[in-house]
Amino acid sequence: MATMVQCDRQYPVVAWTTLPRVRTVEHVPTQSVEAARDTRDAALPGFAVAAIREEGRWRCVRMDPEALVDLDAAITALRGLRSPGAVIGLLDVDDEFFVLLRPAPGGVRLLISDAVAALDYDVAADVLDLLRVELPPDDDALDDPWPEGDMGILSDFGMAADELEILVGDLELWPDEQLDTIARRLGFADPLDEAVGR
């Protein structure tokens, strides 16, 4: 069952607490999440794409590069599409991690592939802020990446939470390769390739 999490930002988040996560950071001392450098004005490698399903077909459109550095910009862009069908935002940020976003009534569903990226990237810190997740203070706990968010974000398209968890945990794959796998699994690999110019 979904639980709406209220926050001070413009977009509350739907947190799905019953789904599995690779690692939890609950009930431990925490440190606030702030990126070490301000990346909001930086042009980062990667891509930001909106996948839109309408009348049983997928199409993909490129989003403004600002979506890679500012989560609010990404959410606003997705909501601005005003599609009657499903909309999924796919962010490949600096070839280091990815973010999935889905606008929902009264909120947004989120998944980030590497929570530790919040130490270096503002958009990742924004994701953890909306999820109300803070990183543990123990540096050893930050050595290995782990995902945070809604592992069931794609379950209504046939990609179950445990399947997505396995994909996100495959450290042999680059973030763009993980997103390509998702696109193939859901059926929009060709539209994604066209949107990113491959």
Image: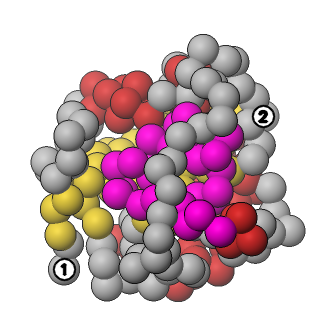
**Kind of residue sitting beneath label 1:** Met
- In the image, which disc is placed on residue 135? none
113, above or below 94, in the image: below
Q: Quadrant of residue 178?
A: bottom right
Q: In which quarter of the image is residue 20?
A: bottom left
Residues at badges 1 and 2 in contact (C-beta under 8 Å)?
A: no
78, above or below 182, in the image: above
**At which x and y percent is residue 107?**
21, 49
- Which residue appears at 36% of the width and 57% of the height? 131
Q: Which of the two residues, 151 or 36, is positioned nearer the viewer here?
A: 36
Part of the protein shown in magenta: 113-138
Quadrant placement of the N terminus:
bottom left
Tag 1's secondary structure?
A: loop
Q: Which of the two residues, 71 or 105, is positioned nearer the viewer here?
A: 71
Q: Can residue 165 be seen in this view?
A: yes
Give the Cα separation between the discs numbered 1 and 2: 39 Å
What sort of colour scheme is used for the picture?
A: secondary structure
Q: Is residue 194 left or right of residue 80?
A: right
Tag 2's secondary structure?
A: loop
Label 1: how many Cα within 10 Å (few below 14, some 14–19, many 20+): few
Quadrant placement of the C terminus:
top right
Label 2: how many Cα within 10 Å (few below 14, some 14–19, many 20+): few
- Which residue appears at 16% of the width and 53% of the height? 6
- In the image, which disc is placed on residue 198? 2
Q: Which of the two residues, 12 or 88, is positioned nearer the viewer here?
A: 12
- In the image, which disc is placed on residue 1? 1
- Which residue appears at 26% of the width and 54% of the height? 13
- Which residue appears at 44% of the width and 34% of the height? 71
Q: In this view, does 141 lie to the left or right of 18?
A: right
161, above or below 177, in the image: below
**Kind of residue sitting beneath label 2:** Arg
181, above or below 1, in the image: above
